[in-house]
Amino acid sequence: MRKTGALVLAGWLSGVAGQALAGGGPASDDKAGSLHEGKQLYQQYCASCHGIDGEGQLDWQTPNALGELPAPPHDPTGHTWKHSDAMLYRIIAEGWRDPWNKTDRLTMPAFGEVLSPHQIRLVVDYLKTLWTPEQRQHQQEESQDAPFPLVGD
């Protein structure tokens, strides 16, 4: 699974580099550095629950003994790619309680006091490298009307 993520990241980076060469985006070194930082932040703050490669917890669709759904995957097998940038930003910043959970606690802790707005965006940008091109396209379309919030660092 780790090799698949690396291949997806490499393919995505080459697309970004192609855009930069054509004048359609930032320099590939800037984007590669940002993605590397996003991956490091993901590994530090997210991987303990969502998996080093975004694979999520076992049986993530089945409530555990507390009646809570385990952490979902962020790779192509999950549903993260179905959410807009604004929603993903909000979930990371404010935390999340799955509406299906039988407890009232946030099962996804809030990271808005730990990560800057810029760092949250870097994590979301890294997550996008875990998805298929079709999933990234869908997520981009979802984000057209719900982009990242305009907040300063």
Image (spheres, helix red, strand yellow):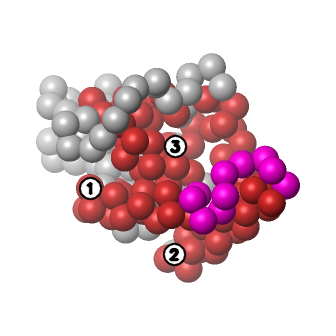
Secondary structure under the numbered disc 3 in the rendered image? loop
Amino acid type, mark 2 = Met
Q: Position of residue 99 (x, y in %)?
A: 32, 26
The residue that mark 1 highlights is: 45
Amino acid type, mark 1 = Tyr
Q: Is residue 60 above or below residue 69?
A: below
In the current view of this chain or complex, which residue is farthest to the right?
A: 22
The residue that mark 3 highlights is: 79
In the current view of this chain or complex, which residue is farthest to the top?
A: 145
Q: Quadrant of residue 12?
A: bottom right
Secondary structure under the numbered disc 1 in the rendered image? helix
Distance of label 1 from label 2 (alpha carbons): 20 Å
Between discs 1 and 2, the one toward the N terminus: 2
- 10 Å neighbourhood of mark 2: few (<14), some, or many (≥20)? few
Q: Is residue 146 above or below residue 53?
A: above
In magenta, the rendered stretch is 22-31
Q: Position of residue 5 (x, y in %)?
A: 55, 70
Is residue 47 found left or right of 13 in the rendered image?
left
Q: Quadrant of residue 132?
A: bottom right
Q: Residue at x 56, y 27 (%)?
A: 147
Does any portion of residue 90 appear in the rendered image? yes
- 10 Å neighbourhood of mark 3: few (<14), some, or many (≥20)? few
Is residue 147 found left or right of 71 in the rendered image?
right
Is residue 11 found left or right of 97 in the rendered image?
right
